[in-house]
Image (cartoon, rainbow, N blue to C red):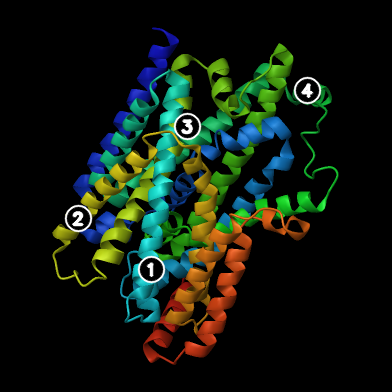
Amino acid sequence: MSDTAFQTLAMVTYMAAMLAIGWYSYRKTHNLSDYMLGGRELSPAVAALSAGAADMSGWLLMGLPGAIYAAGLVEAWIAVGLTVGAWLNWKFVAPRLRAYTQVANDSITIPSFLENRLRDSSRLLRIASGVIILVFFTFYVSSGMVAGGVFFESSYGMGYRTGMLVVAGVTVAYTLFGGFLAVSYTDFVQGAMMALALIAVPVVGLVRLGGFGELSRLVGESDRAANIDRLALLPHPMTGVALLGIVSALAWGLGYFGQPHIIVRFMALRTTGEAKMGRRIGIGWMLFAVLGAVATAMVGVAWYQKQGMKLEDPETIYIKMGQILFHPLIAGFMLAAVLAAIMSTISSQLLVTSSALVEDIYKALGRDQRSDKHFVALGRLAVLIVSLVAMLMAWTQNDTILSLVAFAWAGFGASFGPITLLTLFWRRLSAMGALAGMVTGAVLVGIWGNIAGGPGHIFDLYEIVPGFLGNLLVAWLVSRVTWRPNTEIEDEFDRTLAEVRAAG
């Protein structure tokens, strides 16, 4: 068999496994809670790896190794910010969100939780949240489909649209039928594939190079030839613009508190107490994956220096090293890990978008007197509609859609992040305060993200920072004016706190 045949066999095997998991999950999905939240039956391991896989996407296997290969550890600050943010999210948000969403009328989406927690009888908060999710995630899903099309085009020489349709078809199929369980189980498998691949490449590469001494010598030679220092953590010289860049990279961690497709995993845990084990597994996975990505880049630098060759596209370093170091069948599964990273994010975003359309907009408009069977069917229809819209947007490859990923991360982080924290830790947040803060965060991100420069290059600061802080300030000020005592809210807050304390 040719190398391409082996790699195709690996890819087909991977795709078939994802569809099989989708069918298995379909057999276990019986009502709306199952479809949207897996019946709150996720184990800590599945919740942790699915959250990580939904978060990282192709950036972990291509973007980060490529940046480290080209410029060194100075590009790793974003990984530091994300790791710290993920730890804080698991430590402080996960247990309270798991407990509070069940106490607050068994809420199964973030917008419905906000409405139930704050007793918003106007339903404006729930609808506004659902609309924000629907709009941003439709673009987000589209960017993932673009990435899938580009992946097949660059890896197999397949047409961009054909590759996009393959990725969309398989991902939509298992998401549409299997719902939250399918998304979580496939994300678990995909997360494991990503971590194993990022460990295998540098370990085998290091052995083939001859150990750490030879790796260090070859990286040093490459650095001197390129006149850079890849082991330096700080840019030289440390200018104000460089400092803003580091702060912006670290600020990516703020986004975790408001990403609906990630924090929904916390809500699906079996018990509040399992958040602790989920944190240990999730952060352990993240550390292995991020360090593996950095090590892959360094091994790649040494390998190409030893061969006297130049890599044209640094973002392909993981793929190239997989093809160099492993049998074509194993290299095929290495390629499948890239696709797994892309598909895991698309499926998670599709499901959250579906839940926003059905649970947070359709039901909030007064159409909540139907059976669960009706809403599950509607949820599947919503997955199909959103995916078709996203495919139409991605039909002509458009880099501006891919650039929206950073903008959308900031939008969700600044809109939902502060409100999520306030609902869990501050009794006196009001519905009007939450709505005003959410709108402020979204508007600030929209304005700040489209301005550059300014005094001291202040507008080069990542837009999530002003959006997050503006949201917090406005939500606090408006709540100070509009909050009124409510014994039901006080009771639920106390019950949640008691459950979290009991869970340790």
Residue at 49 percent of width and 53 percent of height? 408
**Amino acid at pointer 4:** Ser
Q: Residues within 10 Å of mark 1 (few under 14, many from 20)?
A: some
19 shown above or below 235 = above
Name the residue carrying label 2. 378
Q: Of the residues under marks 4 and 1, which one precedes in the sequence?
A: 1
**Alpha carbon distance from label 3 to label 1:** 34 Å
Q: Closer to the observer: label 2 or label 1?
A: 1
Mark 4 and mark 1 in contact? Answer it, CB < 8 Å.
no
**Amino acid at pointer 3:** Val
**Alpha carbon distance from label 2 to label 1:** 20 Å
> Residue 110: in sight, yes or no?
no
Residue at 52 percent of width and 83 percent of height? 478
Residue at 73 percent of width and 15 percent of height? 306
**Alpha carbon distance from label 3 to label 2:** 31 Å
What label does residue 222 carry, if any? 4
Label 2 secondary element: helix
User: Which of the two residues, 136 or 201, is positioned nearer the viewer here?
Assistant: 136
User: Which of the two residues, 196 or 160, is positioned nearer the viewer here?
Assistant: 160
- Expressed as whole percent of the image width and height from the top left, the position of residue 88 reads 58, 61
Count of numbered tags: 4
Residue at 55 percent of width and 39 percent of height? 60
Q: Residues within 10 Å of mark 2 (few under 14, many from 20)?
A: some
Q: Of the residues under marks 2 and 4, which one precedes in the sequence?
A: 4
394 shown above or below 156 = below
